[in-house]
Image: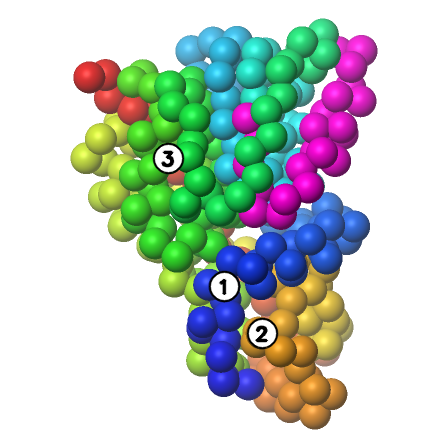
Amino acid sequence: LQTDMESSLTSKTLIARRFARSGPTYDRAAIVQHDMAHQLVRLLGQVLQSTQLEHVLELGCGTGLLTELLVQRFGIQHLTLNDIVPDLSGVALRCSRRGQDPRVSGIRFTLCPGDMETIQLPADQDLVASNAVLQWATAPQAMLERMIDAVKPGGVLAIATFGPDNLQETRDVTGRSLHYLPLSALHTALAARTEVLICEEETRTISFESAYAMLKHLQRTGVNGLDQRPWSPRAVKEFCTVYESRFRAGGRVPLTYHPIIVVARRREV
């Protein structure tokens, strides 16, 4: 179970393929990510001095969970959408279907597919936002610098991501994990160039009837399979047996999430 997991988790081709496959099931399964998006927009409403934004960049827009909340909450003139999955047309279409709302019908969408760590990002943004994306970066601190660069002085950077305790049970069984940044490291990385306005974290546990049901949940949110190659039935059975022996309690098994939300304002030059 530990063969190539670490390298595969940072394979951008594999990440894109996983999330492309999970598109039809993501919104229903991504309970924690959904709540993170709502919390991020709620906190942005407290921080932003105006609900009218000229230029907004969303990184890793996925199926549009955060996108739809942003366009409902704020008056956006130009919204640039990025995701590693090439086809972003569905996200823009979902938002444009709210065309009876003048805040949405007046938005100019720009689609910017590709790896957020390497593509050219638009500059001078009033807001750069991302939900459940930063943890996939190969070099997260360098990615934070890129995000700050994209924000205009006085603009806002809003990030919802995951911390080191995320999916700790699967890490305990497989010995592998993404390289999550702790809240303290996020704060330190941002503090040099921004005023950190909000910095909060929590741990949240979801329970499942079985380890297999937990794996299906991960699959439906794009975090399916812990190796580049599909697991054999034997490997799945081995994983589930170990997982349940370690964590089953009260007839169910847990999966821990560790959401982190940071909102910062870029300092004026």
**What residue is shown at x 62% (from left), y 15% (from top)?**
108
Residue type at mark 3 is Met
**What residue is shown at x 67% (from left), y 9% (from top)?**
106
- Give SS at disc 3: helix
Quarter location, residue 262: top left
Query: Which residue has dot 1 on it?
Result: 11
- Specify the segment rendered in magenta: 80-101
Tag 3 or tag 2, which sits nearer the N-term? Answer: 3
Instruction: State how far apart marks 1 and 3 are (Cα).
Output: 21 Å
CB-based contact (under 8 Å), mark 1 and mark 2: yes
Instruction: State how far apart marks 1 and 2 are (Cα).
Output: 9 Å
- Give SS at disc 1: loop
Q: Is residue 190 above or below residue 43?
A: below
**What residue is shown at x 31% (from left), y 30% (from top)?**
149
Q: Position of residue 74 (x, y in %)?
A: 58, 16
- Give SS at disc 2: loop
Residue type at mark 2 is Gln
Q: Is residue 250 visible?
A: no
Could you tell me how many numbered marks the image carries?
A: 3
**Dot 1: few (<14), some (14–19), or many (≥20) neighbours within 10 Å?**
some
Q: Position of residue 228 (x, y in %)?
A: 58, 74
Q: Can you tell which mark lies on residue 228?
A: 2
